[in-house]
Image: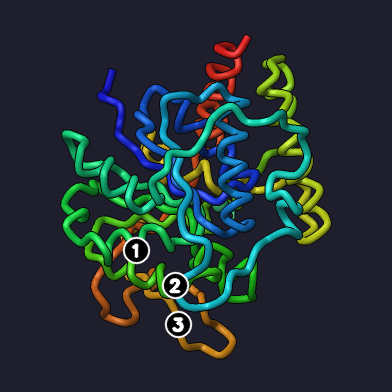
Amino acid sequence: MTVPVPVVIDCDPGHDDALAIMLAAGDPAIDLLAITTVAGNQTVERTTLNARRVCTVAGITGVPVAEGCARPLVQPLLVAGDVHGDSGLDGPRFSEPTVDVVPEHAVELMRRVLAEHPEPVTLVPTGPLTNVALLLTRHPDSARDIREIVLMGGSAGRGNRTPAAEFNIHVDPESADIVFNSGLPVTMCGLDVTHQALATPDVLGRLERLDTGLSRTCVELMTYFASAYRRLWGFAAPPLHDPVAVARVIDPGIVRCVEANVVVELHGRYTRGATVVDLHQYTGRPVNARVAVELDVEMFWDRVIAAVDVLGRRMR
Ligand code: RIB
Ligand code: CA
């Protein structure tokens, strides 16, 4: 039994963020120290309420939840109501959450948790990188407390919010630029790999057969998410982006990566927010990231479904 990896998730729930939180809380390979929220899929008020809802419905207690930045570093906030709905977690009906937030700002909670933990902590951002960028710039000493940053975001190919930019990076390119230039070990789980994590009818059937309140909530979340991806992009099944970053931390064998230079386009008239991934060393720029390229789909879904099952059974 390996020692669980200490993790802080920084997220913008968000249907896929919700499953990322459950995977991190339910898999024994992770020690989930804290959950911080950021504006992205919806306003930070709504992403924070959704994080509280997920913790409540999944029985995740004793993990501090803190609200973070309400807007990106430079540009105005763009939300994704077309994908995640007006609440940011449309689909299921949630009762009033019983999990509350801590009074600290997310960046302060991150700083404190990192400083107090006896070993370096892995940050798993699954939304825009505003909170992480502020942590690195306001509290540069925190960098020594970070083992690595394993993020969901970017793309070595096309985007999903503009032809060039993936949503998390597109919302706050300046923050992403700070993270990729931080000198810390960064792993980018972009659309190249997350589009392999498709919540197919077989996956939904496996979730349904768990027959717990939580698994039924997950099916409702995936059903809503599927309708958005069908309507907007013609996907037969929705890609569950964010849990891929958590899976990489759980078992690097689930997510194969290559080393590359990644820069964030800040000034392109048509390409701002693009992650420019030099997979073939054209530029001579130094490697600054691992880029995820392949998912072990079977291992991935086995871990996601097992985590939902563990949490769901506890709630019975
Ligand atoms: O592009 C997909 C990413 O944007 C995911 O993290 C999703 O939750 C949204 O935040
Ligand atoms: Ca997200």
The quadrant in which residue 27 appears is top left
Task: Tell me the residue that label 3 is attached to.
Answer: 266
Residue bearing mark 2? 73
- x and y percent of residue 149 in the render? 33, 52
Provide residue 183's location: percent of width, then percent of height: 22, 64
Q: Which residue is drawn at 59% across and 39% down?
A: 18
Please tell me whether residue 306 is drawn above or below residue 96 in the rendered image: above
Residue type for callout 3 = Leu
Q: In this view, does 116 lie to the left or right of 300?
A: left
Q: Residue at coordinates 34% horizontally, 80% vertically from top-left?
A: 282
Q: Is residue 281 left or right of residue 15?
A: left
Q: For the view shown, which residue lies furthest in the top direction?
A: 316
| Discs 3/2, front | 2
Residue 53 picture quarter: top right
Q: Which circle's residue, 2 or 1, is located before the other in the chain?
A: 2
| Residue beneath the point at 42% across and 43% down | 103
Q: Are marks 2 and 1 in contact (CB under 8 Å)?
A: yes
80 to 175, vertically: above or below = above
Alpha-carbon distance for marks 3 and 2?
Answer: 12 Å
Q: Do the residues labelled 1 and 3 touch (CB within 8 Å)?
A: no
Residue 231 location (% of width, % of height): 83, 57
Q: How crowded is mark 2: few (under 14 residues within 10 Å), some or many (20 or more)?
A: some
Query: In the rendered view, does 107 fall on the left or right side of 297?
Result: left
Q: Distance between the residues labelled 1 and 3?
A: 18 Å
